[in-house]
Image (tube, grey):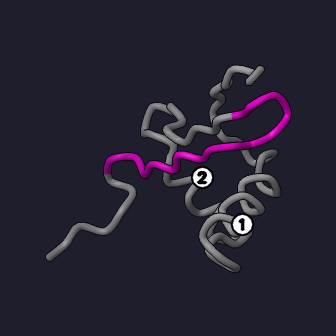
């Protein structure tokens, strides 16, 4: 039997798990401590809503959704 997924906002406490999964899936150094912290900060809206989400299956991280909030990325010229 497969357990259900639980979705939770990503926080600084998730850094090690998110980096490990991201680098396992995409290759070494895809995500670093520095880029994790930067992306986490960029995912917070002007009113404090966290747009970054994690999918957990029991105690195992199985998915990461990193989303930059409006105004948190460079605009093309």
Q: Is residue 14 left or right of residue 53?
A: right
Q: Residue at x 66, y 29 (%)?
A: 8
Specify the label residue 40 is tagged with: 2
Q: Residue at x 50, y 31 (%)?
A: 49
Query: What x and y, as percent, mark residue 33?
Result: 74, 69
Query: What x and y, as percent, mark residue 23?
Result: 69, 69
SS assignment at label 1? helix
**Which callout, 1 or 2, points to the residue nearer the camera?**
1
Going from N to C along the chain, the mark reached first, 1 or 2, is 1
Q: Is residue 21 left or right of residue 38?
A: right
SS assignment at label 2? helix
Residue placed under numbered mark 1 in the picture: 24
Residues rendered magenta in the picture: 56-70
- Farthest-out residue, right: 59
Specify the label residue 51 is tagged with: none
Mark 1–mark 2 Cα distance, whole angstroms, equals 19 Å
- Relative to 27, does residue 67 appear above or below in the rendering? above
- Relative to 11, does residue 26 appear above or below in the rendering? below
Query: What x and y, as percent, mark residue 70?
Result: 32, 47
The one nearer the camera, 29 or 58, is 58
Q: Quadrant of residue 1?
A: top right
Local crowd at mark 2 within 10 Å, few (<14), some, or many (≥20)? Answer: many
Any magenta on residue 67? yes
Any magenta on residue 46? no
């Amino acid at each position: 039997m497969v357990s259900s997924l639980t979705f939770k906002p990503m926080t600084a406490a998730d850094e090690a798990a998110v980096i490990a999964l991201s680098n396992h899936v995409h290759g070494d150094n895809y995500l670093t401590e520095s880029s994790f912290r930067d992306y986490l900060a960029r995912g917070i809206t002007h009113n404090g809503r966290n747009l970054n989400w994690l999918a957990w299956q029991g105690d195992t991280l199985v998915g990461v959704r990193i989303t930059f909030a409006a105004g948190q990325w460079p605009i093309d010229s």
